Image (cartoon, coloured by chain):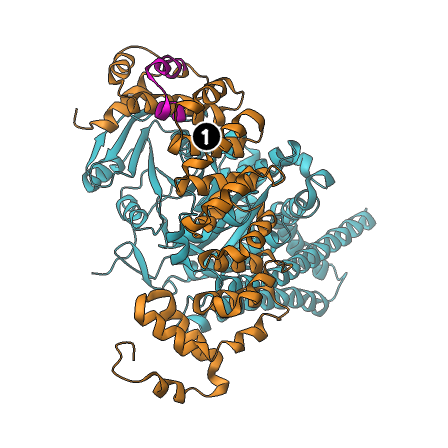
Amino acid sequence: MRDIGWTALLLVNSLALVYFALLNSTSLLTSLAAYRSLRRYAQRLKTVDVLELLRSGAAQSITVVAPAYNEEATCVEATRSLLTLEYPEYEILVVNDGSKDATLERLSEAFDLAPAPRFPAADIPSKRVRGTYRSTRYPYLWVIDKENGGKADAINAGLNFVRTPLFCTIDSDSLLEPEALLRVSRPFLEDARTIAAGGIVRIVNGSTVWASRVMDVRLPRSMLARLQVLEYLRAFHSGRLGWAELNATMIISGAFGLFKRSVVVEAGGFASGTVGEDMELVVRLHRHCHENGIPYRIVYIPDPVAWTECPETVKGLRVQRDRWQRGLTEVLTRNLRLLFNPSYGSVGFLAFPYFFFLEMLGPVIEVVGYIAFAVTIFVGLASLSYVLAFLMLAILFGIALSIAVIGLEELTFRRYHRTADLARLFWLAIAENFGYRQLNSLWRIKGMISFLRGRHDWGELTRKGFATSD
Amino acid sequence: MLSGERPERELQALVARKGSRYFVNFLLRYARQLRGPQKDTVLRLAASHLDVLLVDLRARSPERRAYALKSLGALSVTSYRDQFLEALTDPSLLVAMNAAQALARNYDVSFADRLLHSLERFDGWSLRYLAAMLASMGSESVEILRQAFRDTRRSSRVRAAIAMTLTTLNDILAVQTAAQVLETESNTDLIVAALGLIDRVGGPDQLSAVRRLLSSSDPAIRARAVTALARIGSSQDVRHLQAALDDSNNWVVIHAVEGLLEMGRKDILEAVAGSDHPRALAAREVLWEGAPDA
C-alpha cells in the first residue's frame, strides 16, 4: 500500500515537473516568436502612412458593435470615444442587452436618440429586438434595444444589422485609441484571406482619461490591478503575438476584435449561452474555414489599443477568473476534435493542445503539484533543498520571461514612461509568483468546478467608470 | 527657410555627410505635409542626401528596403525611377507594393506596362486597396487601364480592381467590356465590379445583360444587379425590383428598396411599408432615410 502511495506521489511530482517544463518552454518559444514578430512589426509600421491610408479610399467600411449590459456608469464615455475614432467610413451600433439600469436612458439623453426603422441584413437567431434608435446628432450612431440574452446574443443581434464588410466588437466599457481601427484593419487590406484580427487590450485603471482619450498612461494604484497590467502585457505581447506568428491564434479578445462579416455570418455568429464567446468564435472560425476549404488568416496586431477597466477587488477578480476559466473549459471541451488533429494545422497540433493541457488543466496540475511537493518533503522522499531548488528554477524562469516581455514593451511601444512605473513592473514580475499566481490557480480550479456544475452566468460585474480629468 | 527668408544652402551647410540619414528622416515629415513651393524647397534640400537610401534598398530586411522606397517615393521618384521599377520584382510584396504605389502616384506611360504587369503579384490584396492605388495614376492612365480590363489573360481579381478604378475615373468607354464580362465571366468579384462600372456610366445598351443577372445564384451578384438596374433601367424594370423584394436574401431586399426609391417609386414603398409584407420594415427604413421627420 505504501509503495502504491509513493509511486503515485512520484507520478504526480513528475507530472508537475513536466507541466512546468512544458509551460515554460512554450512560453519561451512564443516569446521568441513574439520578439521576432514585434521587431518586424515595429519596422513595418514605418512603411505605413496612416494619413495616406485615410485619404486613399482603400479602407473598407466598418461597423463597431458594442454590447452593453448595465453600463450606465461608462456607456456614454465609451460611446463618445467611439465617435472620435479616426476612420473614413464607420458606423456604431450600441446594443443594449436588456439592461436593468438606466443604460438606454443615459445613451438617449447624451446622444438625442430617436426611434428609427432598420432592416436586418442577416438572420442569426437572437432575443427579440425591442427597438432601433438613431442619434439625431450623430447619424452614424445607432442603438439597438433588445431583451436580455447575454453578450454573445447581443453581438449577434447587432451583427444582424451590420451592413459593412467588416465589423468590430468591443466591450462597451472599453476605450479605443483614435487610430485603432485604421491599424487593426490593415491586415484586411494586405491579405484578402484575413477573416479576423485582434489588437492589444491594456488596462486603463490609474491612467488619466480626458475627452474619452487616455492621455496619461500610469500604473494603477491598486496592487491587484498592477499585477493584472503585467499579466495583460504577458498575455498579449508574448502569448497572442507568439501564437499569431505560428498562425495559430485561438483568442481574439471580446474587448477588441475586427471580423469579416460574411464569414462570421456563414459560421452562424457568436455562440449564445457561453461565457467564452470570443474564444469560441475564433475556434469555430478555424474549424469552419478548415472544414470548408476556405483559405484564411486570423491575425493579431500589437499596436491598435483598446483600454479596459480591470477589477480592483479580490472578489471582482475572482469572479472574472472564474468566468474566464469556465469559458476556456467550455470552448475546449466543445471542440475536442481539434486536439492533436493534423487536419486543423498548427491550431490542432500546437495551440489547441497547449490551451487544453497547460491553460485548462494547468491550474489543477499546479496546485496538486504544490501539495505533492509538500507531501514529498514531509515523507522524506525528497529533500527540502531539492524541491526548493526546482521551484526556484521554475519561478526564476517565469520571472525572466516576464522581464523579457516588459523589455519588449519598452523597446517597441513604451507606454509606461515613468521610471518608477517601470521599476514597479519589474518588481511585480517577481512578486506575482508569491501568492498571486497560486491564488489565481485556485480561482481557476473553482472556475472548472463551476463549469462542471453547469454554471453559465457572467457573475456580478461592477464598473467604477473612467477616471477623467477636467 | 520655407518662407524664403533664409537661403537653403545655410541649412545644407549645417548637415554633415554622416547626418544625411537623420536629415532625410527629418525632411520626410515635412514632405508629407507640405504642398506647392514649400514642398519643392524640401525636395531640393533632400536631393543631395538621398543616395544614403540607396544603400538601404539592398538591405536584407524587407522592412528596411520598403522604408527606403517609401522615403524615396515621398522625396523623389523621377530621379530613382529605375530603382522603383526594379523593386516591383522584389521578393517581398511589401517592398513591391511600396514601389508600385510610388510609381502609380508618379504615373508615366513609359512604365505603365511594367506597373500593370506587377499587379498580378498583388492578387491577394484587398480590391479596394488595389483600386485606390490604380486610381492615383489619374485620368491619363484610362486608356491603358481599359486595355488591361479587356485582357482576359489577367487574373479575375486584378481585372476587378481595374474595373473599380475605371468606375472611379468614370470611364464611359469601358462599359462595353463590362457588359462582356457579365456575359462571359463567372468570378463574383469581377462581375460585381463590372456591374458597378455599368451602374456608374452604363445605359440602356447593357440592360439585358444586367437583367439576366437578377436570377444569378449568387446573392452578391443579384444585389448589385438590382442596384445597377435601378440606375440604368426604365419604368418596365420596376417590376423586377418589386420581385426582388421577395428575394430570400436580405441584402438583395435592401438593394431593391433603395432601388425603388432611386427610381422615384415611393408609392410602391409606401404601400409595402403600410402593409404586413415581410419586407415592410425595409421599406419603412428607406422611406425614413429619405424623410426622417415624416
Of the residues shown, which amino acid type is indicated by label 1? Leu
Q: Colour of chain A?
A: cyan
| Side of A168 relative to A142 (left or right) | right
Where in the figure is residue A465, as x and y percent of width and height?
Answer: 29, 50
Q: Is residue A426 above or below residue B239?
A: below
Where in the figure is residue A280, as x and y percent of width and height?
Answer: 54, 37
Q: Is residue B78 visible?
A: yes
Q: Reply yes or no: does residue A47 show up in magenta.
A: no
Where in the figure is residue A334, as x and y percent of width and height?
Answer: 61, 33
Picture quarter with the C terminus of chain A: bottom left
Residue found at the very far left of the displayed protein: B293
* Residue that numbered label 1 is attached to: B195
Identify the residue at horizontal 54%, vertical 57% (top origin).
B111
Residue found at the very far top of the displayed protein: B276
Q: Is residue A156 visible?
A: no
Q: Which residues are magenta?
A: B227-243
Identify the residue at horizontal 51%, vertical 30% (top origin).
B191
Q: Which image quadrant is residue A292 in?
A: top right
| Side of A48 relative to B58 (left or right) | left
| Side of A395 relative to A12 (left or right) | left
Chain letter behind tag 1: B
Q: Colour of chain B?
A: orange
* Label 1 crowd bin: few (<14), some (14–19), many (20+), radius 10 Å: many
